[in-house]
Image (cartoon, rainbow, N blue to C red):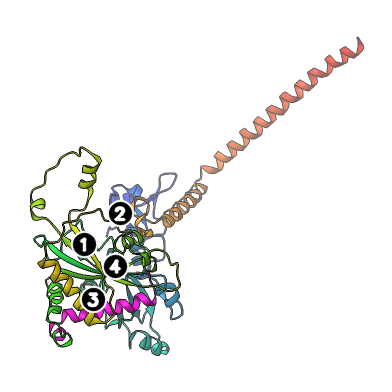
Amino acid sequence: MVELGEVQVAAYLSERKPMGRFFFRNGLPSVVAFPSGCKTSDCLIRFEGELSVDAVIDWFAMAVLNLPRIFYYSKESLGPRFLAKSSPHKVKVIFFSKTGERATPAIRQAARDYWNYATFACVLWREEEFSVWWNTFGVESAPAVVFLKDPGLKPLVYHGSVNDSWFLDVLEQNKQQELPQLRSLTSEELGCDARGYSRAGRDTLTWYCAILAGRLGPELDSMRETMRRVQETLSKSSELKAASEDEHSITAAVALKSKRLTLSWLDGETQKNYCFFYLNIESSYETCGPRRVPTDVPRLFIIRYERNATEDTFKVDKKAKSIWEFYQQEVDPAAQLSVTYNGSAEVSRIIQWMSNIIEDGDSRKLPFYRVKTPELVPEDAEPFWSRGPQGLLSKSMGTKEKIQRTIIRIYDYLGDPRIGPALLLGALMSFGSIWLMRTQQNRSVQSSQPSQADNGVG
């Protein structure tokens, strides 16, 4: 806060009229902000709206901090405009509010930081719509926060006012789906990358990743639910012993607990190159790439990764002497072997199959086969609020501000007392030049007329 008595600081923060006079366009109090990287008064941002708490907070979050807005949706628009348009791999976070106030800058900062994992929306709570929200999400009052994760999974509902630190903790715990999606952003985190390492640590030389691939649709949703039950069963060793008759099925549970086994799903249409690479069979078009047939067939396969401890410890950089040596240097550091599941969708059968694969992969000496794996395609475009000019404003807001500033400058010049005499002088000079041009034309015409007469007499 700056008192007006601090003349030098107040003059530095004020605007200047064309005559050099200092003034505050909207009077006092006036709010200005120096964005990051701004060191002079020429690049500061001024608040031009009505001085209310809601307006100032929204201006500060959007123009200064460059944070995204979290929009409100009605019961009619929430489904088609938010849920249907949100990315399938993102967790949906919905805030229910009684007052309709905007999200705080801390919540909007979380929406920016977690935009790769979650998407956010707000809903104004109305008592007459209680049955709609209760039957849809299980919300009985506001304020409340709802987390929508995997399809068919019961929503997570938290009632009560939202504390910023508490919300960040809950968001971090629930940023991933129960069965996480294999993406370019999460491949190393999940341990499903031949260029990375196991979730169990860099010392783990052999690990596994079970991937369910398929196109988005009811078939994939049903199989994802089955894989969630597999993951839940493996996480609970006591239930696994009671549900499984084969003792060897415990192997998968031990591998999952020690983080040597990861379960995930893959969008076979978006990641078609990656999908075709591992499902190299005749009917892979039923799972990978664009939809060509009416029915989709999700498929489960498991990848065994193996690293060579000696090669990781001792690496020598040398130039390739031939194309073959260059190709050998370009392969991924971890060896890969994949197996596709051809059994039924029963939880016990899938667990037994994974346990057999892991036990076989740990006990046998398998070929150390390395290859270059296709890159996973990024599934999210860069958000519009991260591409603003100078990293501060979005393109639309930047253009709007430039137009507004141009109009304001025109009005300022129109109010300048020197503009009247300048316009008068310009008008006089313009009329004088026109009069001079016409006078010269008349003289040239008059001088040409006598010569023409003399020629006629001769």
Residue at the spot x=33%, y=81% of the render?
152
- Give the mark, 1 or 2, whose residue is nearer the N terminus: 2
* 232 is within the stretch colored magenta: yes
| Residue 325 drawn at (x, y percent) | 21, 43
Tell which circle, 3 or 4, labels the residue nearer the N-terminal end: 4
Q: Main secondary structure of the magenta part?
A: helix
Question: Viewer-proximal residue, 145 or 8?
Answer: 145
User: Mark 3 and mark 4: span between their CA atoms?
Assistant: 21 Å
The residue sitting at the top extreme is: 458
- Residue hosting label 3: 163
Which residue in the structure is indicated by mark 4? 117
| Residue type highlighted by circle 3 | Asn
Q: Amino acid at mark 2?
A: Pro
User: Sequence-wise, which precedes: disc 1 or disc 3?
Assistant: 3
Work out how far the residue at label 4 is from the one at label 2, CA to CA, in angstroms.
Answer: 27 Å
Q: Is residue 15 above or below residue 453?
A: below
Nearer to us of marks 1 and 2 is 1
Q: Residue at label 2? A: 35
Instruction: Tell me the SS state at disc 2.
Output: loop
